[in-house]
Amino acid sequence: MALRAASLLPATISVHKEPKSNASLKDTTLFRLPFSTHFSFPLPLTQELRKKEVPARIVRAQTAATTPAVDQAAPQGKKTLRKGNVVITGASSGLGLATAKALAETGEWHVIMACRNFLKAEKAAKSIGINKENYSVMHLDLASFESVRQFADNFRRSGRPVDALVCNAAVYLPTAKEPTYTAEGFELSVGTNHLGHFLLARLLLDDLKKSDYPYKRLIIVGSITGNTNTLAGNVPPKANLGDLRGLAGGLNGIQSSPMIDGGDFDGAKAYKDSKVCNMLTMQEFHRRYHEETGITFASLYPGCIATTGLFREHIPLFRLLFPPFQKYITKGYVSEEEAGSRLAQVVSDSNLTKSGVYWSWNKDSKSFENQLSKEASDAEKAKKLWEISEKLVGLA
Ligand code: NDP
Ligand code: PMR
């Protein structure tokens, strides 16, 4: 795949003109292996208050959670002095796990690791040294709407407020010859990365609204590869949602194409399309709900974390060459730890409260508001995507 893309490169890539204002800060020129972190977490907590936090619990999808965690009844506008509660999907590896660690380590967050593989998540949290007081694992399979609904119910029954939701989990199936499908029959990449998260975010929105935490945030992880205003986004196959006819038809490969634009199945494109959906969804949430709720909606490109499990389905040669290629050639590489602290920053840094933003980091590891591609910032497409998606997930 790497070789195929490399050989295609000179002939097929036409890089769009970059905006003048922050041309030196674009995704494509961001990184020089930065390892320092430059962020502060708000809301210092006293040891005493921390002691009041319930111990870490394990909650399965099938069983209701038990202990009510925190008193939610603080009056509006009053600053609460409690830990924040952040739900992170796909926290069993890679970026999600590193973010869970970064937030848990502050002692100011309780991380709910929302994962499809319960034991893997539990082992991962232990092996990375997250203090058991600072996390719980709850079962969530984004490839099943039933599981997403059960997760939301179980979470609510746990009595724990939600102050931040991070839609991080994803699958990437670049070598698949044929599409595979979610429980409800949607192509797996878009079904998991977009539709599962869309349903989850919609279901937890009311809970987020109720949070009395000083900052409430809904973060959806995006990527450079869905943005065709960058070099990385111009590596074929390029993201393109077209007129959404495949999505409107149900992405089921029977009456409709398994691809959003109605074309032939391509696993790498399906992933990139799903990332465009993630970035459009974040903006549509912002337009519909930011003013009314005060929730900050944001997306980000955390850098190229070339060593994560995301590339597990890729050919071995790709997995061997991709990290050095990103480290030494594109200089886009970031470690899982650095990427985790970037996402943690978007969750909790008091400087990053602006809503509707797609964050990136420059070579000095400083965050900046990046520009999305034309398609990934198309408000009409975002609205259409929202309306079709809410029908597909059973909300309209
Ligand atoms: P990983 O494969 O390490 O992490 C993905 C996580 O998603 C895993 O925990 C995985 O669970 C989980 N997951 C997959 N399917 C489901 C499902 N059906 N239900 C619940 N959880 C699921 O990859 P990354 O850490 O790299 O990816 C995290 C995010 O970062 C993704 O949104 C990706 O698009 C984004 N990203 C990654 C970049 C990179 O360079 N790696 C660059 C830009 C963005 P399990 O452990 O059980 O497999
Ligand atoms: Mg890319 C500055 C250039 C840059 C950056 C930051 C990335 C990030 N990539 C860049 C350039 C290139 N890539 C070039 C020039 C090539 C052709 C040789 C290239 C190829 C390539 C492949 C085959 N790149 C890839 C793949 C993948 O399979 C990865 C992918 O698309 O996953 C969806 C990928 C990525 N490159 C990145 C990043 C961040 C990824 C993967 C993850 C993602 O977007 O989620």
Image: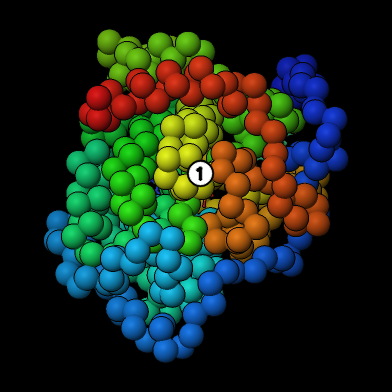
Tell me the quadrant of ligand 2: top right
In this picture, residue 222 sits left or right of residue 372: left
User: Which colour scheme appears in the figure?
Assistant: rainbow
Mark 1 lies on a secondary structure that is: strand
Q: Of 109 and 79, which appears nearest the observer? A: 79
Quadrant where the image shows the N terminus: top right
User: Where's residue 243, x and y in %?
Assistant: 47, 11
User: Where's residue 239, x and y in %?
Assistant: 57, 24
Is residue 313 among what the camera can see? Answer: no
Quadrant where the image shows the C terminus: top left
Q: Of 165 and 235, which appears nearest the observer? A: 165
Q: Of 182 and 198, which appears nearest the observer? A: 198
The quarter of the displayed image where residue 126 is located: bottom left
Identify the residue under disc 1. Answer: 297
Residue at left 14%, top 61%? 63
Residue at left 54%, top 77%? 44
In this picture, residue 388 sits left or right of residue 302: left
Residue type at mark 1 is Phe
Residue at left 41%, top 83%? 50
User: Where's residue 3, x and y in %?
Assistant: 69, 32
Count of marks placed on residues: 1
**In the image, is the residue at mark 1 within 8 Å of ligand 1 by its beta carbon?**
no
Q: Is residue 348 above or below residue 2?
A: below
Residue at left 48%, top 74%? 108
> In the displayed image of the protein, which residue is found farthest to the bottom?
48
Circle 1 Cα neighbour tier, 10 Å, few/some/many (<14 / 14–19 / ≥20):
many
The quarter of the displayed image where residue 161 is located: bottom left
Is residue 65 among what the camera can see? Answer: yes
